Amino acid sequence: MKLQGTMIINDKGHLEIGGCDTVKLAEEYGTPLYVLDEEHFRNNCRKFYQAFTKEYGAEVLYAGKSLLTLAVCRIIDEEGLGLDVVSGGELYTAIRANFPMERVYFHGNNKSAEEIRLAIEHNVGRIIVDNLYELELLNKIAAEMKATVKILLRLTPGVEAHTHEYIKTGHIDSKFGLVIENGQAMEGVRRALEMERVELCGFHCHIGSQIFELDSYGHAAKVMMKFVNKVKEETGFKAGELDLGGGLGIYYYEGDEPQPVERYAEIVINTVKEQAEKYNLPMPKVMIEPGRSISGPAGITLYRVGSIKEIPGVRKYVAVDGSMGDNPRPALYQAKYEAYVANKMNKAPEEIISIAGKCCESGDMLAWDLSLPRVEAGDILVVPATGAYTYSMSSNYNRLTRPAMVLVKDGKAELIVRRETYADLLRNDLIPDRLKKKVLNIASVR
Ligand code: LLP
């Protein structure tokens, strides 16, 4: 197995992370349990900060959609990164965590008036405007609030990144952004430049997620700079900022080959520089928005094994106490994960098993055909690389409660998300009076 971050196998043959024995964590906090390795998470932040900010003065905006909690906001702030938020809820999390609002970038393809007001009220750094409707709405709301709002326009550069269909966003047939090719993007620029309450600072694009081909970024940067030049020629506006989105791929499973962050930075920055020189444009400030590559590898999930069903000659299903509710990625994207038996790390593989979740749905599988030591009820299964898009995409399907999350560091574990309770599940449920169960009044019966 790939022991990532602070993971080691201790002398009991248990997996340890952040100096904490995962078997003990499971006993103490219960399962399923999300575990976030603080040192690993911070190191990932630092790799980006070093490669982009220290080296080239570019800004790194952590994509909160991959994993956002109050504690995560605090770490991101301490590491000097900015924050990309995509909803009022993510923005509210940043506000409540006292995240510096000037480093918040607000995305979304259908921001509501209420979300826009919240963003303006709190002076977020930039609003990334996705479409012409939003541009008009923003200008109107800003006027009502007597504010001027700094924006980037999100463009669709028409670059196909090689990744799963659902997580491709830069190609033309996408719900996101103004299309460059059909003139929509230029129309957006003209409108924005005319507007009183909107200050256009530059452009944004995001070409997809879980990307291993760094050339895709170079290609996107070229398309964007060509557009920057066209805008200068047609309107005289020189874009000062270029946000090239996130998407760097991480290791989940055999065959995944993450690319070094330094190389990513080099390609992005050098391409923008070359293009700026080619068109005789000022070098814009570059931003990037990594999410998964920061949070993903730093998280693991612990489960306890329950029922085991063997169909001789067909398959062995090992069911755990989690499900597509805590990690919908295998069901949604056919995502592949590795898994290990946390309490049998030194035991040799003996059997091929598939890991089933506990939802009433055949598609609720967490991993297929893994070669593991003999698995028994009560064992602790660990799924690595689950820091991104698991908790943030979790649901209460089947009325399962969401797991807790602990932050581990130097042998200490601290709860950063409480485990949901049954009472939490009913928090928003109401019974109209007419449906209330009538309690029989014994006295009146007599
Ligand atoms: N910036 C923008 C505008 C984005 O749309 C995204 C991801 C990111 C940055 C961060 O991308 P990352 O570095 O995390 O790949 N739920 C899917 C991934 C959806 C990504 C959506 N946008 C999954 O679990 O694979």
Image (cartoon, rainbow, N blue to C red):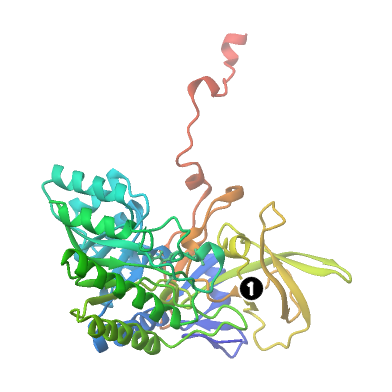
Residue nearer the viewer, 23 or 198: 198
Answer above or below: position of 7 versus 403. below
Q: Is residue 283 visible in this depiction of the protein?
A: yes
Q: Residue placed at 29% from the left, 75% from the top?
A: 225
Residue 124 left/right relative to 423: left
Circle 1 crowding by C-alpha within 10 Å: few under 14, some 14–19, many from 20: many
Residue highlighted by disc 1: 381
Estimate the x, y position of residue 210 in percent, counting from the top left.
50, 74
Q: Is residue 198 visible in this depiction of the protein?
A: no
Residue 313 left/right relative to 162: right
The answer to whether the residue bearing label 1 lies less than 8 angstroms from the nearest atom of ligand 1 is no
The C terminus lies in which quarter of the figure?
Answer: top right
Residue nearer the viewer, 365 or 137: 137
Residue nearer the viewer, 244 or 292: 244
Q: Quadrant of residue 441?
A: top right
Residue 34 left/right relative to 89: right
Say what amino acid the circle numbered 1 marks.
Leu
Ligand 1, seen in the image, is in the quarter at: bottom left
Which SS class for mark 1? Answer: strand
Estimate the x, y position of residue 400 in percent, counting from the top left.
58, 52
